[in-house]
Amino acid sequence: MHADATPPIPSDSVSLVVTSPPFLDVVDYAQDNWLRCWFAGIDPKSVRLTVPRKLDAWATAMTRVFQELHRVLQPGGHVAFEVGEVHGGRIKLEETVLPCAIAAGFEPVLVLINDQEFTKTANCWGVDNNNMGTNTNRVVVVRKELR
Ligand SMILES: C[S@@+](CC[C@H](N)C(=O)[O-])C[C@H]1O[C@@H](n2cnc3c(N)ncnc32)[C@H](O)[C@@H]1O
């Protein structure tokens, strides 16, 4: 189901959303999800993924997702929205996330940045730590206002 239209989820019914959207087009998510698709009997090519190349198109898509999250959340409910830095650290996606969330009616709470010397899974197949790919976590927490 596409994250910007989830009609089976009733309005004002969810306390907390924890999610991590596509980071622009820097990962091939169809290939990334081949194992779980195979296990669930889903053809990855049949899934409509959001893979915008440009930041403004990504912001438009994320604003639509936040509008849907705003619909399903209870008043006072929270979203924890995890993103990373991309394009060699030049684009810090949390800087784009916050205006999208505010445009959808959310109140900002905090941005948590996890930046550490770490061994990430991709290191197993030759991606250097803190060099290629995404190397920090940036969790944007926002709240739906209490009525
Ligand atoms: C940064 S990854 C997060 C992965 C997550 N932690 C997991 O274990 O599945 C982004 C995920 O969003 C999925 N995705 C892409 N477009 C989507 C959309 N329109 N609606 C919902 N999910 C989407 C991708 O397939 C990918 O699994």
Image (cartoon, grey):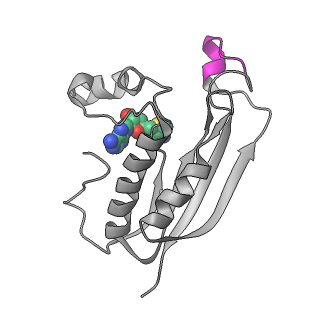
Residue situated furthest top in the rendering? 126
Residue 86 x, y percent position in the rendering: 61, 32
Quarter of the image where the C terminus is located: bottom left
Count the numbered circles shown: 0
The quarter of the image that holds ligand 1 is: top left
Q: Is residue 32 above or below residue 59?
A: above
- Out of 118 and 57, give the one closest to the viewer: 57
Residue situated furthest bottom in the rendering? 147
Residue 113 x, y percent position in the rendering: 71, 50
Q: Is residue 131 above or below residue 53?
A: above
Quarter of the image where the N terminus is located: top left
Judge left or right: residue 142 versus residue 138.
left
Judge left or right: residue 113 versus residue 33.
right
In the image, is residue 55 part of the stretch drawn in magenta? no
The magenta stretch spans which residues? 122-128
- Out of 35 and 55, give the one closest to the viewer: 55
In the image, is residue 124 part of the stretch drawn in magenta? yes
- The residue at the point 24 percent across, 32 percent down is 47
Q: Quadrant of residue 110?
A: bottom right
Residue 46 x, y percent position in the rendering: 20, 27
- The residue at the point 59 percent across, 57 percent down is 140
Judge left or right: residue 41 versus residue 84.
left
- The residue at the point 37 percent across, 54 percent down is 65
- Out of 132 and 92, give the one closest to the viewer: 92
- The residue at the point 35 percent across, 55 percent down is 64
Residue 115 x, y percent position in the rendering: 75, 42
Q: Quadrant of residue 17?
A: bottom left
